[in-house]
Image: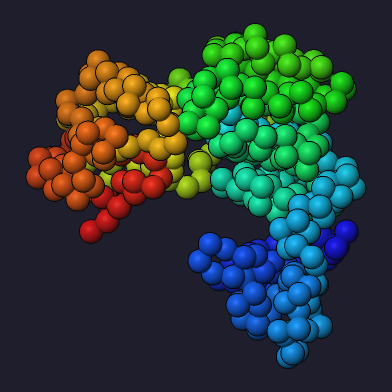
Amino acid sequence: MDFIPNEYAGVVFDSRKVKPGCLFAALPGATVDGHAFVRQAFEKGAKGLLVRADRAAEFSGSERDALIPVADVKASLTETARAYRRSLRAKVVGVTGSAGKTTVKEFTAAFLRQKGRTHATDGNYNNDLGLPITILECPPDADYLVVEMGTNHPGEIAHLVGIAQPDIGIISSIGTAHIEFFKSQDGIAEEKGTLFRSLPSDGFAVLGENNDRYEMLKGMCWCRVVSVAAGSAPFGCPLVGEYNAWNMSLAWACAHELGVTEAMARAALDGFSLPGDRWRTVKRDGVTFISDCYNANPTSMVAALKAFAAEPCAGRRIAVLGDMFELGAESGRLHAEVKRVAESLPLDRVIYVGENFGGVTRDEAKAELFATVRAGDAVLLKASHGMELQRMLEA
């Protein structure tokens, strides 16, 4: 290892998030280079400074004693995480899917915390940088480690499972997210299924019977498959929507296999909520706004619309839908399909935002919405994060 992970109070690459005792990784970026903030990180209390060896000579002050020179900073984080993972006693649960993976991860971690010390991916830290950092921050005495794995290009899940070496795998769904890079749902299933192929023979995979590629994914497993049917959880879901009930059921199936009891799970659900801008409810002047703008793809968009249409509402239901990204040649068809679903549901009004939907600009949508919305109405804001629809709620 280039450094000993448990000697540090966390790992950060953003100097604004430095806390005393942490490791600061000076990563090169598209617009800024982390090496420019090394001194600032040290002055804020960073205990270790991971820098490129050919840049170490740039530092001549008291921070020199904290330098850890390596050939490649990102590669060092990756390889150290891989080695550290092998030293952990924790059972590692890997979670991936086109939609719902963060929700499944959060439910799984909440349930397992009732059984033992559990560390999990923070928010949506699920890529080739976030996953190594999640592992590096795992306490050495943790009983469980729950890692989320995201992908938008072929081969990324293979890279992530090579670092995390999961014992257990959960695939939340196979939809059309990032289909631009995978060409088809079968291509997406092949990529996500890499998680199942990587599991040891004494591990297990968790898969919902509602999954669009259930048989295909089940056939990728060398280990035992725990199949999840609708309504399999012995308690209600604290989140709205049938899709969230499925997400919770996947997490419960995993946790139950690991010894979590029904009483423990019920305790975990007390006050449960999701991180980020996921189904965030804001009430203003008698209007209920639901901001679900952390991300969007056709699968999650349709699920959110159906959940919103089923929510109790004293007034009108108004949906504001923004463009979905990374759909490639299928973009036109998939946006049209979401429109078809939206217009088939009991919604009083739908406002489309962005070029892909053939809609208006965000500012025009805001003006149109607030000119007509009134007390008792409910408003859903749903789009890919880059559309920044949540800004419509700013004053």
Horizontal and vertical percent for residue 306?
Answer: 35, 21
Residue furthest to the bottom in view is 61
Left-right relation of 179 to 39 = left
In this view of the protein, which residue sits in the foreground, 14 or 107? 14
Label total for image: 0
Q: Indicate the quadrant where residue 16 lies.
A: bottom right
Q: Is residue 261 above or below residue 136?
A: above
Residue furthest to the top in view is 215
Q: Is residue 275 visible?
A: yes
Quadrant placement of the C terminus? bottom left
Q: Indicate the quadrant where residue 281 lies.
A: top left
Q: Indicate the quadrant where residue 354 lies.
A: top left
In this view of the protein, which residue sits in the foreground, 170 or 113? 170
Horizontal and vertical percent for residue 40?
Answer: 61, 81
Q: Is residue 90 above or below residue 299?
A: below
Residue under the point 17% across and 28% down: 349
Horizontal and vertical percent for residue 332?
Answer: 32, 26
Horizontal and vertical percent for residue 371?
Answer: 9, 45
Q: Is residue 345 visible?
A: no
Residue under the point 67% across and 34% down: 155
Give the colour scheme shown: rainbow
Left-right relation of 157 to 339 = right
Q: Is residue 134 above or below residue 43?
A: above
Residue under the point 69% across and 66% down: 25
Left-right relation of 9 to 41 = right
Quadrant placement of the N terminus? bottom right
